[in-house]
Image (tube, rainbow, N blue to C red):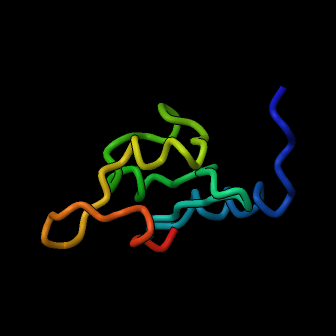
Amino acid sequence: MRAQQPVEMILLRQVASYLTIPIWMMDSDGNLVFYNEPAEALLGIQFDEVGPVHADQLGEMFRITRVDGEPMGEMEFPV
């Protein structure tokens, strides 16, 4: 059984679903717990297809690059 999310995370997810700007939500452990529809357009996959992602798997799922297309190291991006 999955642990219950704090009420603040539930409410923030609800608000994020109405926003037109990309929102990426992470929990206190660095796990990806939600991203909204505008973020889906940037990431190229719907959250419903991915679901929550453990922090260790994020680097494998998404290719994070600089503006010039060069890959970024794990310590370079702000998440």
- Which of the 4 image quadrants contains residue 66? bottom left
| Residue 25: image location, x then y, percent | 60, 60
Judge left or right: residue 45 versus residue 67.
right
Judge left or right: residue 66 versus residue 16.
left
| Residue 19: image location, x then y, percent | 52, 67
| Residue 32: image location, x then y, percent | 59, 51
- In this view, the residue in front, 51 or 12, is 51
Judge left or right: residue 59 versus residue 11.
left
* Quadrant of the frame with the N terminus: top right
User: In the image as oriented, which residue stretches furthest toward the left?
Assistant: 68
- In this view, the residue in front, 54 or 14, is 54
Name the residue located 30 percent from the left edge and 51 percent from the top edge: 63
From what the image shows, is residue 49 above or below residue 5?
Answer: above
Name the residue located 35 percent from the left edge and 63 percent from the top edge: 73
From what the image shows, is residue 67 above or below residue 17?
Answer: below
User: In the image as oriented, which residue stretches furthest toward the top?
Assistant: 1
| Numbered marks: total | 0
| Residue 6: image location, x then y, percent | 86, 55
- Which of the 4 image quadrants contains residue 76? bottom left
